[in-house]
């Protein structure tokens, strides 16, 4: 895994933790999250992860239209990035599941004999990853 991928994964985990801890909807905490994610957009302009995370923040703040724009931007930057596609599916559906997709790991369903990708709304071609 490249240094950029590691940094983006750590960013996703940090934002997940901050969002989950901010159940009181502290505007100060949302501001910190937005600042971190916007900084990542500047640092990694071609990465899908910051746009997916910003979409999550906007959805949590009640800005559904803005969230969908960022999920679509993430999917356009990297069509193989599953969290953005899953969040588009989740937030664009009348029947929402409770799961929010921060990382690729969130898109994997564990089974007894290995891993299987959850059913996606759109077909996706995924490279075989030896680390699984």
Image (cartoon, rainbow, N blue to C red):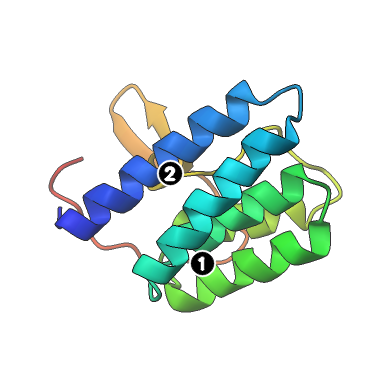
Residue 12 marker: 2
User: Which of 122 and 131 lies nearest the eye of the viewer?
Assistant: 131
Looking at the picture, does residue 32 appear above or below residue 23? below
Where does residue 119 sit, x and y in percent of width and height? 55, 49
Where does residue 15 sit, x and y in percent of width and height? 50, 39
Q: Is residue 61 left or right of residue 5?
A: right
Q: Judging from the image, what secondary structure is the residue with disc 1 in?
A: loop
Disc with the residue nearer the chain's start (1 vs 2): 2
Q: Which residue is mark 1?
A: 123
Between disc 1 and disc 2, the foreground one is: 2
Looking at the picture, does residue 90 appear above or below residue 85? above
Q: Is residue 93 left or right of residue 110?
A: right
Q: Is residue 5 left or right of residue 50?
A: left
Report whether residue 127 is seen.
yes
Looking at the picture, does residue 117 appear above or below residue 66? above
Q: CA distance from mark 1 to mark 2?
A: 24 Å
Q: Residue furthest front?
A: 28
Res 124 quadrant in image: bottom left
Q: Quadrant of the C terminus?
A: top left
Q: Residue at x 83, y 48 (%)?
A: 62
User: Which of 19 and 130 lies nearest the eye of the viewer?
Assistant: 19
Q: Residue at x 28, y 27 (%)?
A: 113
Q: Residue at x 75, y 65 (%)?
A: 66
Looking at the picture, does residue 44 appear above or below residue 112? below
User: Which of 84 and 65 lies nearest the eye of the viewer?
Assistant: 65
Report whether residue 120 is seen.
no
Q: Residue at x 62, y 71 (%)?
A: 72
Q: How many neighbours does mark 2 have within 10 angstroms: few (below 14), some (14-19), or many (20 or more)? A: many
Where does residue 110 sit, x and y in percent of width and height? 39, 29
**Count the marks: how many?**
2
């Amino acid at each position: 895994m490249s240094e950029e991928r590691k940094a983006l994964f750590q960013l996703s985990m940090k934002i997940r933790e901050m969002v989950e801890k901010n159940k009181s909807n502290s505007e100060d905490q949302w501001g910190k999250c937005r600042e971190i994610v916007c900084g990542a957009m500047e640092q990694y302009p071609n990465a899908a992860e910051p746009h997916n995370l910003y979409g999550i923040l906007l959805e949590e703040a009640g800005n559904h239209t803005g969230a969908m724009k960022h999920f679509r931007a993430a999917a356009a930057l990297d069509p193989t990035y599953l969290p953005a596609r899953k969040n588009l599916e989740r937030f664009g559906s009348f029947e929402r599941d409770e799961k929010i997709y921060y990382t690729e790991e969130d898109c994997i369903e564990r089974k007894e004999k290995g891993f299987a990708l959850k059913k996606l709304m759109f077909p996706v071609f995924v490279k075989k990853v030896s680390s699984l």
